[in-house]
């Protein structure tokens, strides 16, 4: 498993310059050894593994369970390969905050330098943008993305490492994507998920297979036209205050119950307390998608202007009025990329586990650092995987 989610405590402050420079220096040595030994595509594959990524950060001396590991490790690796990207065949774009918004332009720059074809460059940019849209709009788990980095090799393999922040819980969650494992950008794109925190209680997970009928109904509503869709939206607006118990309307003086739900059905639904009063922006986006009639849910999500609120509105109409349920289960699982000790989601793959540890160990030993520095790095690795 090479894609997943990890949850960490939220850090504040900055990484000390002396530590960052050390991470850059050791990171450069590690990457050169790993690429020489296994090739650039294998490095991309490993970066997309949440546990391996965590282990690499630990070896480079950052706290293993802190949110800062994601942002600092990515920045250190990007700095480490500056000037030798072509030699290694690895390219890193994006980063934290405003730097994440520069990802498309940085991909374009490298595509130009590498003389990549226009379709290949556009495909890399598209996958970068869609991974961010999926994790912000389809996995509505309360974590706002603030870090997005896109790794790719000269052969076209790519990985995404992005992180979201939940200010109330003071935690951060990391999402991994790997090109060779992706069959569908929309349905269950995450696997090998790890989480150190309790699962989120208010999640709308439109990537779940259990949300497939809800997604299909959303598409049908868009195809039905703006006027028809708005009648359903107006129905929600009229009765939004009673959604947690039931949704009903009066027809010819008789009470017609469209859908009756137990209170527990909506305790985790993120739209219950949302104000669905008239919104010019939402109405404009709904008109746009009804006019353009996207051919797939992926095309719908890729439409400019479509975001979490549009997805939530269509999801709620699909469920409450037409009975097509969505999933409210947090996709984060209590499991690790190498398996779990209780055999959940599968028994520990000791062979792969040992290979991952040995790969990092060999890389450390082959660096040009002093024996003392190597022992410190190996000590970090041993302490993390001591049983």
Image (cartoon, helix red, strand yellow):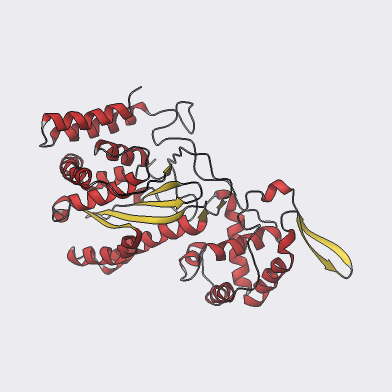
Q: Is residue 110 left or right of residue 330?
A: left
Which of 225/32 is in front? Answer: 32
Which of 246/23 is in front? Answer: 23
Q: Is residue 38 left or right of residue 281?
A: left
- For image coordinates 17% across by 51% down, the residue present is 81
- For image coordinates 23% across by 64% down, the residue present is 111
Quarter the N terminus occupies: top left
Quarter the C terminus occupies: top left
Residue 263's spot in the image, x, y percent? 73, 48
Residue 97's spot in the image, x, y percent? 35, 59
Q: Is residue 328 above or below residue 302?
A: above
Q: Is residue 370 above or below residue 193?
A: above
Residue 313's spot in the image, x, y percent? 61, 64
Which of 298/198 is in front? Answer: 198
- For image coordinates 22% across by 66% down, the residue present is 109
- For image coordinates 27% across by 30% down, the residue present is 381
Q: Is residue 113 above or below residue 24?
A: below
Which of 372/330 is in front? Answer: 372
Q: How many marks?
A: 0
Q: Is residue 179 above or below residue 115?
A: above
Furthest residue to the top? 387
Residue 291's spot in the image, x, y percent? 55, 77
């Amino acid at each position: 498993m090479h894609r997943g989610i990890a949850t960490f405590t939220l850090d504040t402050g900055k990484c000390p310059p002396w530590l960052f420079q050390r991470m850059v220096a050791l990171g450069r040595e590690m990457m050169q050894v790993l690429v020489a030994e296994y090739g650039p595509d294998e490095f991309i594959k490993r970066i997309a593994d949440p546990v391996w990524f965590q282990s690499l950060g630990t070896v480079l001396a950052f706290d293993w369970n802190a949110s800062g590991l994601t942002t600092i490790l990515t920045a250190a690796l990007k700095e480490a390969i500056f000037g030798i990207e072509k030699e290694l065949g690895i390219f890193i774009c994006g980063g934290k905050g405003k730097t994440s918004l520069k990802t498309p332009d940085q991909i374009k720059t490298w595509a130009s330098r590498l003389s990549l074809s226009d379709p290949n460059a556009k495909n890399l940019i598209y996958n970068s943008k869609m991974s961010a849209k999926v994790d912000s709009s389809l996995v509505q788990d309360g974590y706002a993305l603030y870090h997005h980095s896109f790794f790719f090799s000269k052969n076209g393999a790519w990985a995404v490492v992005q992180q979201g922040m939940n200010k109330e819980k003071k935690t951060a969650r990391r999402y991994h994507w790997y090109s060779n494992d992706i069959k569908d950008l929309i349905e269950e794109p995450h696997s090998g998920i790890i989480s150190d925190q309790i699962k989120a209680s208010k999640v709308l997970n439109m990537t779940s297979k259990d949300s497939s009928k809800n997604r299909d109904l959303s598409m049908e509503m868009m195809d039905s036209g703006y006027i028809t869709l708005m009648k359903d939206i107006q129905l929600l607006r009229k009765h939004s205050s009673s959604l947690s118990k039931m949704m009903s309307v009066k027809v010819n003086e008789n009470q017609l119950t469209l859908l009756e739900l137990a209170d527990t059905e909506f305790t985790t639904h993120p739209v219950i307390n949302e104000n669905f009063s008239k919104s010019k922006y939402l109405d404009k986006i709904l008109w746009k998608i009804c006019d353009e009639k996207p051919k797939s849910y992926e095309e719908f999500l890729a439409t400019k202007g479509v975001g979490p609120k549009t997805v939530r509105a269509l999801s709620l109409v699909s469920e409450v009025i037409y009975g097509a349920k969505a999933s409210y289960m947090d996709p984060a699982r209590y499991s690790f990329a190498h398996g779990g000790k209780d055999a959940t989601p599968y028994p520990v793959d000791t062979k792969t586990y040992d290979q991952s540890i040995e790969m990092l160990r060999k890389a450390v030993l082959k660096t040009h650092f002093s024996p003392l520095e190597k022992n410190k790095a190996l000590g970090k690795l041993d302490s993390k995987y001591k049983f």
